[in-house]
Amino acid sequence: MSVLNVLDTQTVSGSGTAYIVVKSGVVRAYAAAASSIQFDAGPAVTLAAGEAILLSVGKPKSSRIKAATDAAAMVVTVDHGGTPAHSFAVGDYIQTVDGGDTDGFVAAFESAAGDGKKVTAVTDTTITTDYNSSGASADYAVSSADVIAGTVPQIQRAVKLTAGTNDVVVEQVQIVGG
């Protein structure tokens, strides 16, 4: 028998938006009163009152950050091996986290998923975002010590959630068992 492991829960207010970092790619959406939920710019999914539904929000994406610019449009260079070095696409929402490197990857480089930052351009090794990291005193570069310690900053894919007229509870779930 399969069961659901709830990874996190987000309530999206009626006619409001919220963001989640994609962990499993599967969410359970529930509305006490009939509503709808939309992921990024996709179609709205109708939710019947009092019934939960499992939906896909796409695959998780993440990459280790090798460098980041202190600019109005932060450019992240990723370190993942291979070409391309990441699977991010223009229009993806993102979150950047320090990964444990609290000395070099300062708060000015960190963007919470709830801020709704987007990827605006990509190359094989870089991701340009609309996140303003100009508050940092200099560009960021990962140190050898952080690589050895496993404290390398990360960029992660997020999804924008837009609710219909009524509140929607969105639980990111992992399906366990079989």
Image (cartoon, grey):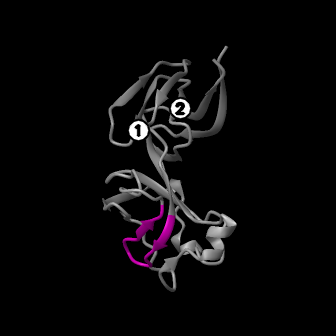
The disc label shown at residue 39, or none:
1
Determine whether, in the image, residue 102 is placed left or right of residue 78. Answer: right
- Residue 148: image quadrant is bottom right
Q: Earlier in the sequence, mark 1 or mark 2?
A: 2
Q: Is residue 131 magenta?
A: no
* Residue extending furthest toward the front: 82
| Magenta-colored span | 65-79
Decide: few, some or many residues near mark 1? Use Cα within 10 Å; few <14, some 14-19, many ≥20. Answer: many
Three-letter residue code for mark 2: Val
- Residue 84: image quadrant is bottom left
On the image, the x and y values in percent for residue 56 come to 46, 31
Three-letter residue code for mark 1: Phe
Give the residue drawn at x 57%, y 39%: 11
Residue at disc 1, secondary structure: strand
Q: Is residue 127 above or below residue 40?
A: below
Residue 97 visible to an observer of this rendering: yes
| Residue pointed to by mark 2 | 27
**In which quadrant of the rendered image does the N terminus lie?**
top right
Give the residue drawn at x 41%, y 55%: 86
On the image, the x and y values in percent for residue 121 come to 30, 61
On the image, the x and y values in percent for residue 29 come to 53, 28
Q: Is residue 111 above or below residue 51?
A: below
Residue 101 visible to an observer of this rendering: no
